[in-house]
Image (cartoon, rainbow, N blue to C red):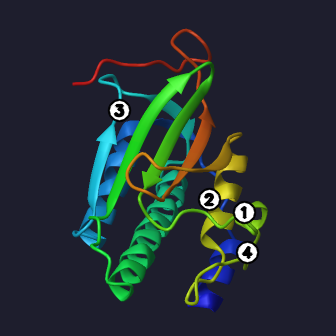
């Protein structure tokens, strides 16, 4: 698995840009995570209108899949710890929010997992850096690379909105409102 992930990271394809509805990319990635982790409640907050961005939809979906996988694993670690300590386990929850403002489209993924490590937070996107025993340390490195190749970024913060502990990871992409560079927000059908 580690060799496969290294190979994927080493030969990441160049983005093939097209106008894509970011909301649909997110919904597809959320659907996949709901199938993989049916015990976790996943909510989406998004504007009514389509959010059209210039991106490689396949790469953005892959990046979001890595973020969702990390959130689910973090929730699993919290649940295992609470179970081991005899504490009542709070249901796993992920909240995905999509918005655009001031030239930036943002997909934020909040969870009620174990939260972000304090000491190693600055290294989370380094290849092969992992806090998990079974992790390869390439998931967030791939997400960061995809975001940067799209002119965007990847941001981390602590989050206590869904439980006592948790994290929020945000992927940003450049966004042009209607009338600028041919991109627009179209009414949802």
Of the pair 2 and 74, the residue shown nearer to us: 74
Compared to residue 49, the image places residue 4 above or below, namely: below
Residue 118 falls left or right of residue 42: right
**Residue identified by numbered label 3:** 46
Please identify, in this view, whether the residue under mark 3 or under mark 1 is nearer the observer. Answer: 1
Q: Position of residue 150 (x, y in %)?
A: 67, 43
Other-residue count near label 2 (Cα within 10 Å), few / some / many at <14 / 14–19 / ≥20: many
Please identify, in this view, whether the residue under mark 3 or under mark 2 is nearer the observer. Answer: 3
Residue at image coords 35%, 42%: 24
Which of the 4 quarters of the picture holds residue 106? top right
Compared to residue 152, the image places residue 5 above or below, namely: below
CA distance separating discs 3 and 2: 21 Å
Label 2 or label 4, whichever comes before in sequence order = 4
Q: Position of residue 155 (x, y in %)?
A: 65, 47
Residue 176 falls left or right of residue 111: right
**Residue identified by numbered label 4:** 10
**Residue identified by numbered label 1:** 121
Label 2 or label 1, whichever comes before in sequence order = 1
Q: Secondary structure at mark 3?
A: loop
CA distance separating discs 2 and 4: 13 Å
Label 3 or label 4, whichever comes before in sequence order = 4
Q: Quadrant of the N terminus?
A: bottom right
Label 3 or label 2, whichever comes before in sequence order = 3
Q: Position of residue 159 (x, y in %)?
A: 51, 49
Evaluate if marks 1 and 4 touch, with contact meaning CB atoms under 8 Å apart: no
Please identify, in this view, whether the residue under mark 2 or under mark 4 is nearer the observer. Answer: 2
Residue at image coords 23%, 70%: 39
Please identify, in this view, whether the residue under mark 3 or under mark 4 is nearer the observer. Answer: 3
Of the pair 32 and 43, the residue shown nearer to us: 43
**Residue identified by numbered label 2:** 143
Of the pair 56 and 1, the residue shown nearer to us: 1
CA distance separating discs 1 and 4: 23 Å
């Amino acid at each position: 698995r580690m060799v496969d992930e290294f190979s994927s990271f080493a030969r990441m394809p160049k983005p093939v840009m097209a106008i894509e509805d970011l909301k649909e990319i997110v919904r597809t990635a959320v659907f996949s995570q709901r199938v993989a982790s049916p015990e976790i409640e996943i909510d989406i907050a998004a504007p009514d209108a389509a959010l059209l961005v210039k991106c490689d939809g396949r790469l953005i979906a892959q990046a979001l899949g890595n973020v969702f996988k990390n959130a689910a694993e973090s929730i699993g670690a919290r649940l295992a710890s609470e179970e081991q300590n005899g504490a009542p386990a709070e249901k796993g929850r992920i909240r995905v929010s999509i918005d655009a403002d001031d030239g930036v489209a943002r997909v934020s993924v909040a969870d009620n997992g174990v939260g972000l490590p304090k000491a190693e937070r600055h290294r989370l996107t380094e290849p092969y850096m992992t806090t998990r025993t079974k992790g390869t340390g390439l998931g967030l490195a791939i997400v960061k690379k995809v975001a940067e190749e799209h002119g965007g970024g990847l941001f981390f913060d602590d989050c206590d909105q869904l439980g006592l502990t948790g994290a929020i990871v945000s992927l940003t992409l450049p966004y042009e409102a209607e009338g600028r560079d041919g991109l627009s927000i179209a009414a949802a059908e």
